[in-house]
Image (spheres, coloured by chain):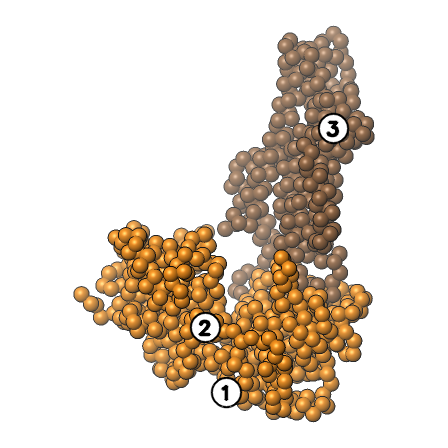
Chain colours: A orange, B brown
Amino acid sequence: MLTEKLLQVENLKISFSTGDSLLEVVSDVSFDIGHGKTVGIVGESGSGKSVSARSIMKLLENNAVVDEGSRIRFNGEELLEKTDREMRKIRGKDIGMIFQDPMSSLNPTMKIGKQISETIQIHEKASKKEAAARAKEIMHLVGIPDVDDRFNQYPHEFSGGMRQRIIIAIALACSPKLLIADEPTTALDVTIQAQILELLKDIQKKTGTSILLITHDFGVVANMCEDIVVMNKGRVVEKGSTMEIFNSPKEDYTKRLLAAIPNLHAEKSQESKEKLADIYSGTREKLLEVNTLAKHFPLGRGTTLKAVNDISFDIYRGETLGLVGESGSGKSTTGRTILRLQDATSGETVFEGSDINKYKKRQMKDMRKRVQFVFQDPYSSLNPRQKVKDIIGEALDIHKLFPNKKKRNDRVKELLHLVGLDGSFSERFPHEFSGGQRQRIGIARALAVEPDFIVLDEPLSALDASVQATIVELLEDLQRKLNLTYLFIAHDLATVKKLSDRVAVMYKGNIVELTDSEELFKNPIHNYTKKLLSAIPVPDPNYAITAEKVSPDETLDFSTEGQVFTEVKPNHWVMQ
Amino acid sequence: MQEEVNLNSGDPTGKQQFNPNVVRFQDFMKKFYRNKSALIGGILILALIIVALVGPYFTPYAPNTQNYSNLLAPPSVEHLFGTDHHGRDIFSRIIHGMSITLRVGFTSVFIGMTVGVTLGVISGYYGKWVDTIIMRFMDVLLAFPGILLALAVVAVLGGSLNNVIISVAIFSVPVFARISRGSTLEVRELEYVEAVRSLGASDFRIIIRHVLPNIMSPIIVQATLNIATSVLTASGLSFLGMGAQPPDPEWGAMLNDGRNYMWNAPHITMIPGIAIVIVVLSFNVFGDGLRDALDPKSRN
């Protein structure tokens, strides 16, 4: 019999036992999913969204306790009352799950065809042959080309996006009624993300399965879901239809989250326009000049990886140059090579008139006072055994800037104030802080030596959206106060647009397009830039997905062989 | 935003303020305490050290006083462990020998560890040809069985307790070099090491302040286990007559002394033998327990 709702979660309450005490992580969570519908749970890290999803599958850790008053009804049956044995029959058969990381959720020693057909054989009395045939059908459904050949390949022979398709195929193997997708596209590049989301919609249309989509990205839910559940600190803040949530959010938290989404259509500030005018008229000082810089990594057997391939650009004092590209495009390597954290293979980086690649040890040490680096991961870039004052003060000690500890520590406190933290935090250790606060400490460390130029290597990508917005504000504020120059490396185009005066797009070691950010978003010329822009999920349900349909076997390949970087319009450079 | 609202309130995480080094230590003690055999090993080692330090002042007889009217006497109230072929009190000799044994164990491992860790860290940190040269040399050292290497070194330097310490130290160098090289390779790649480098820190500073503290756990475990091996090797050398010279009450030498009287006075060999076993076992068990307690993978 068909019940009205496929899944009904009522008063879900989950605690983790930590030794002697119970820590409540989810409480009073209720929502339901209709047949063939998609519901999105949106929340920041630590909001309890993943735990809630896992509890449906009963895949919680051993120390998790689900409160007795909780109800999870699936297709008319109470899941919480099921034994482990009964649950195993449901997992994979009636409910499929897609995990975040496509790199680690496949068994590397098993052929992918076998991994898909295995699930079928576990749940259905299918012969090996039947299961294989079914598996091929599903592979076809999720858009894997050359199914017969690919059936016998191992996971490492597939790209990240393809692996995520395989994981979806495994989840779909037994035509589940519900598909739980836990951040299915977070680990993927934006162009691949668009493909995978498109695929999920397509599958839903064909099979009528319901989807529970868990994500932190409002852009993703806007285009995918009928209903949205917003979670924060283990509780449901607001739920309703996607239109309601986006157009008339009721709760402050939801409003704040929505406001934190960078707007692609926002105008650049007057200040930025003046900067650009200075740069283009040649009145602004050139701080850094990169000439045919290359960085190659030997891969062995005579082959090399050309991570950075003869790129040239200038950075002017006081501006922010955004460097965008997908993973593997060489943008981080560029940042590192410019600061000589790695030695360049060839080319020069001219900083105030001299090439830093030719600097001797002494000059290099002096240079380190002038240029700084902010790292991507606020967790691993701070030594866990050092106090904040020693982390920030380290640069001051290295360059012997302060004669005694007292003065040094006073300076550290000043720096903490500068990045919006309390001076008393200097006596604490990194693990006592949240990701956003840690990133502020990382910024304070970079500011300690009063540099002119800072390379920001994806400083926001490990942070929640609302925290990202505050860090962007901080960076803009600091730039104004201290006349800093930034090279801002990122894969998220929206934040790049917000922060940067000019933007360079990198693709496979080359800069394919370089112009001011407004122009780039309005009139992209290179095909790769166009593809990148069209793939950004628009956090607005009123916009239908306009991204052209990309067939999965069409890998993004824009050869740059024999092309030159030319100025096609005034101040708009394109590789062609 | 929402996270940053109470940015400047006293407590960033709502947790109590604590020092991770203290927490780590408490966590370590908790786990260590749960491992009963390791605890016993630790207590035994502590007892052995105390005996080695104060014991010599309280022994009933001097270790080298001979009494030819009471040769090869079996254990009794007067002579707790009996007497040897010169009528010396074995109990007193064992107590005095304790400090020799522990001294050999600790100093040889300390020297071996210092040299080995220095080489290993340099090797791992700088890599390339430095690494190749150092590690190939370590491979050569490792290719010899430990006792054979130690024998060869003592044969060249001449038999004495100090030379035993040096030879045992030499054969424990490669183990430490390997372990510290491996850990250094791991730590070197961490982002905070790169962060410090981008601030302009010298290699020396990075190694001392950022690499060493983070690779100490496996080294401490290895040092503890190595003390057991060193004690065994040193006794072996003395047994062969290459180490402590008579009349020093070294346990290996005592074993050797008792060899000719094994049938009519077995206690002369058995007692130093048991003493060696107890010391070796204590350090081994303690080292295993340390490894379990310090292993981050078993941390819950």
Query: Looking at the image, which is closer to me, B172 or B141?
Result: B141
Q: Do marks 3 and 2 share a subunit?
A: no
Mark 3, residue position: B151
Judge left or right: residue A210 versus residue B164: left
Identify the residue under disc 1: A265
Q: Secondary structure at mark 2?
A: loop
Residue drawn 63% across the image and 91% down it: A570
| Label 1: chain letter | A
Front disc: 3 or 2? 2
Amino acid type shown at disc 2: Glu
Left or right: where A410 falls relative to A381: right
Where residue B293 appears, as percent x and y from the top left, is 56, 44
Q: Could you tell me residue A276's position as x and y percent? A: 65, 89
Occupied quadrant, residue A165: bottom left
Question: Could you tell me the amino acid type at mark 3?
Answer: Leu
User: Residue B71 is drawn in which quadrant?
Assistant: top right
Query: Where's the N terminus of chain A, which quadrant?
Result: bottom left
Q: Is residue A567 left or right of residue A256?
A: right
Query: Label 1 vs label 3: CA separation?
Result: 80 Å
Neighbourhood count class around disc 3 (C-alpha, 10 Å): few under 14, some 14–19, many 20 upward: many
Residue extending farthest to the left is A1
Q: CA distance from mark 3 to mark 2?
A: 69 Å
Q: Which residue is mark 2?
A: A554
Nearer to the camera, B110 or A353: A353
Q: CA distance from mark 2 to mark 1?
A: 29 Å
Q: Where in the figure is residue B4, as x and y percent of width and height? A: 54, 73
Which chain letter goes with mark 2? Answer: A
Residue beneath the point at 53% across and 85% down: A524
